[in-house]
Image (cartoon, rainbow, N blue to C red):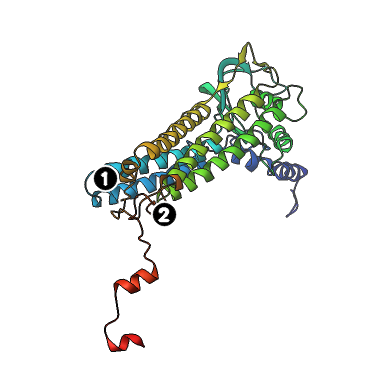
Amino acid sequence: MEPPGYQGPSTNHTQGNEASASPEQPKMAAFGHIFPFYAGPKPTFPTDTTLAVIVAIFLTSLVTFIIILPGIRGKMRLFWMLRVVTSLFIGAVILAVNFSSEWSVGQVSTNTSYKAFSSRWISANTGLQIGLGGVNITLTGTPVQQLNETIDYNEEFTWRLGENYAEEYVNALEKGLPDPLLYLAEKFTPHSPCGLHDQYRLAGHYTSAMLWVAFLCWLLANVMLSMPVLVYGGHMLLATGLFQLLGLLFFSTATSLTPPCPLRLGAATLHTHRGPAYWITLTTGLLCVLLGLAMVVAHRMQPHRLKAFFSQSVGEDPVLELNPEEGGLLSPRYRSITESPEPQDIPLSEASSEAPCEEPDCAL
């Protein structure tokens, strides 16, 4: 017989084990039975949110213009459509490529190790996207479900102003990211012997600055093309294209200063090449240059047709004309001496003798 209220040592021991194990069980269950210091793959949006916002803004502007387009009559409707669509396309491209991470891209499929201090290997597609403000590294298993885990990672490491790439890399180490992600991220650290950090960071800063100047030129071109200063609008459109091409020159020069660093993942090597953002910037820059030159030439050769295309009428006063050399400003052009009637110099003495005074009040 045990006295009432007696609790054996085994019961206390069991409660102690349950108490000591209780903090671990909910933590492991909450994280899906993986390492508690890494909460698994983060949910990713199908595309970059910044690019999505930019595209949404310009698409909203385009839809708004299409709604009011039926109110424009005649051939002006087609002219307005061409001008607005072209202008919105140029502005959207300049902003989108500035925040894009696809200036240099590369992808490789290989068998590689998965985690540190582990002999397990996986089959995966590894992608590298280098932008003006950082790198984006993806790791997708083939198939996605391997080793009882979902292998689908998308990590970004930035070097923009105010961001610390080395600190982000240390955080990635603490999270316990897979080996391929850490290997590629380590190649872009400031202390890596490859020198990719300084190379792409310098290229990104100068290229981004040129694109922002091109965007300001695009804004000024739109303002001037809505005023009777079309030739200056053409000049700003030409400057928009030149600054885009200058940014491409900075990016190509800075990224070719050092020899390429080998990026080996397992038995394969990842090679990078120019991405879609680079080529679309080149296309838009050449388009702006051609349009700017076409406007300058049309202003010299056919100024009236250029004004008709931009819905600007020329005054019918033959004395007040548009001066092409002043950029289409309404400036008076007075008649020359040969066009004006010759003045007649009549001496005062002859005028008085030809018109004698016959009235009595004339003597006063």
For marks 2 and 1 on the same chain, the one whose residue lies earlier in the sequence: 1
Image quadrant of residue 167?
top right
Using the image as rendered, state which of residue 152 and residue 21 is in the foreground: 152
Q: Residue at x 31, y 51 (%)?
A: 314
Residue reaching furthest to the top: 267
Say what amino acid the circle numbered 1 marks: Arg
Pinpoint residue 81: horizontal percent, then vertical percent. Answer: 31, 42
Q: Is residue 181 left or right of residue 91?
A: right
Q: Residue under circle 1?
A: 77
Residue 48 in sight here:
no
Identify the secondary structure beneath mark 1: helix
Neighbourhood count class around disc 2 (C-alpha, 10 Å): few under 14, some 14–19, many 20 upward: few
Say what amino acid the circle numbered 2 marks: Ser
Pinpoint residue 261: horizontal percent, then vertical percent. Answer: 69, 18
User: Is residue 249 placed above or below 12 in the rendered structure?
Assistant: above
Q: Residue under circle 2?
A: 331
Q: Is residue 143 left or right of residue 192?
A: left
Q: Residue at x 56, y 17 (%)?
A: 108
Mark 2 vs mark 1: give the one in front: 2
Using the image as rendered, state which of residue 141 and residue 326 is in the foreground: 326
